[in-house]
Every structure is written in structure tokens, then in C-alpha cells.
Amino acid sequence: MEKFLFFRNIVGDAALIPARKIVHYKASYISTEISFFLEGPIVGEFDTVTISVNTDQVHKVFHSLAEVLNNPSLTFIVIADDVDKEYLHSDITGVDSISLS
């Protein structure tokens, strides 16, 4: 069964992304952001979604992400929803940007 990741910022912009479209993630260990790079419609170009996390907590968020992506019973996964204040992990603080083609 395919998995979908849901993101929504405070102004209501939302993205529902098939997990298979994620090409890679980017964050430094002491970062306060995680960027999801997604297959874009043009070869070699990426769409991105960036979330904010508490300082030095990127590894905890990555751990939670790995757990839900490897759980076969989950198909709809809320990563960050600023409107309903629902987050995959308590150290996620919001959606910074959603940039889709």
C-alpha cells in the first residue's frame, strides 16, 4: 500500500506527497530545519517542503519519520499540520515552506 505524507502551513497551503517521491532529506545535526526534496515534474529539478524543528532535535524527528515509513499499517501520515497543530513528533514546530511545481 502506498504511503502519503501530509504537510499544511498556517495559511492553509497543503501538500499530500507520495512517500516514494522523496529523493532525499537535508538537515545538519544542529539544524532547526529539515528539507524534503521531492521528484519534480522536470528531470533534475526538485520540489521542496521545509519544516522547522527544535534546536538539536533533528535526529529524533528523523527517527520518528523512519518508524512511520516502515510501519506497513500506516498509509496517511501527518508530518506537520500548522492549522490543526498536529505533528509527527513533538519537536516539529511548523511548516516553513511548501514549494511545488
Image (tube, rainbow, N blue to C red):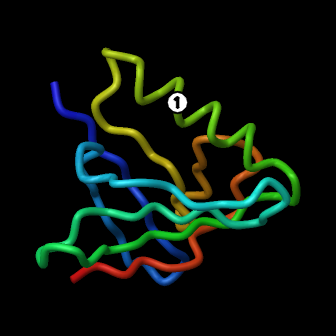
Q: Which residue appears at 43% of the width and 54% of the height?
A: 24
Residue bearing the label numbered 1 = 66
* Residue that lies at the very extreme toward the top in this rendered image: 72
Point out the image quarter for the C terminus: bottom left
Q: Position of residue 79 (x, y in %)?
A: 50, 49
Point out the image quarter for the N terminus: top left
Q: Is residue 31 above or below residue 41?
A: above
Pick whichever, 10 or 37, lies toward us. 37
Q: Which residue appears at 60% of the width and 48% of the height?
A: 87
Side (left or right) of 97 relative to 44: right
Q: Which residue appears at 42% of the width and 77% of the height?
A: 98
Pick whichever, 53 or 83, lies toward us. 53
Q: Which residue appears at 41% of the width and 29% of the height?
A: 69
- Total marks shown come to 1
Side (left or right) of 38 relative to 69: left
* Residue that lies at the very extreme toward the front in this rendered image: 44
Pick whichever, 16 or 70, lies toward us. 70
Pick whichever, 94 or 86, lies toward us. 94
Quarter-of-image position of residue 75? top left
Q: Position of residue 89 (x, y in %)?
A: 67, 41
Tell me the amino acid under the disc marked 1: Ala
**Disc 1 crowd, CA 10 A, few/some/many (<14, 14-19, 20+):** few
Q: Is residue 101 above or below residue 2?
A: below
Q: Is residue 10 above or below residue 90?
A: below
Q: Position of residue 16 (x, y in %)?
A: 28, 58
Mark 1 lies on a secondary structure that is: helix
